[in-house]
Amino acid sequence: MKPKSTLSAIGGWNSFFFCVGMYVVALFFSIFVCSSIFYIANSSKSVKASVVEKTTAKTELASIK
């Protein structure tokens, strides 16, 4: 008579599934981070110019010369 060992056979795969899961999560986050850096580096110049105008156009309350 054959012993039923289906549950114990699945238990041996836990570390493998954990490693595959961690790989998928790390791959997802690395794609997200790299694409964010890529889009920041290659953003259009008109957006960069408007950001520079907004940061340099601050109101001066007092100036010392």
Image (cartoon, rainbow, N blue to C red):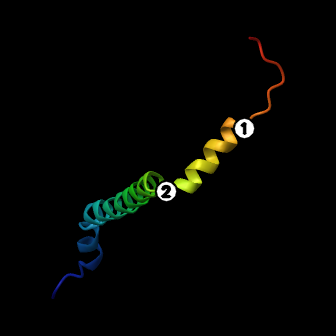
Dot 2, crowdedness within 10 Å: few (<14), some or many (≥20)? few
**Quarter of the rendering occupied by the C terminus:** top right
Q: Is residue 8 left or right of residue 32?
A: left
Mark 2: which amino acid?
A: Ser
Whether the residues at callouts 1 and 2 have beta carbons within 8 Å, the answer is no
Q: Is residue 62 above or below residue 57?
A: above
Q: Position of residue 35 (x, y in %)?
A: 41, 59
Q: Residue at x 49, y 56 (%)?
A: 43
Q: On the image, which quarter does residue 32 sit in?
A: bottom left
Q: Position of residue 52 (x, y in %)?
A: 61, 42
Number of callouts in the render? 2
Q: Is residue 39 above or below residue 17?
A: above
Mark 2 secondary-structure assignment: loop
Q: Is residue 2 left or right of residue 49?
A: left
Q: Residue at x 38, y 55 (%)?
A: 34
Q: Position of residue 28 (x, y in %)?
A: 39, 63
Dot 1, crowdedness within 10 Å: few (<14), some or many (≥20)? few
Separation (CA) of disc 1 from disc 2? 21 Å
Residue that extends furthest to the bottom in the rendered view of this protein: 1
Q: Residue at x 52, y 54 (%)?
A: 45
What label sits on residue 43 in the rendered view? Answer: 2
Q: Which residue is mark 1?
A: 57
Q: Position of residue 62 (x, y in %)?
A: 82, 19
Q: Nearer the viewer, residue 31 or 4?
A: 31
Q: Nearer the viewer, residue 42 or 27?
A: 42
Mark 1 secondary-structure assignment: loop
**Quarter of the rendering occupied by the N terminus:** bottom left
Mark 1: which amino acid?
A: Ala
Of discs 1 and 2, which sits in the foreground?
1
Q: Residue at x 48, y 53 (%)?
A: 40
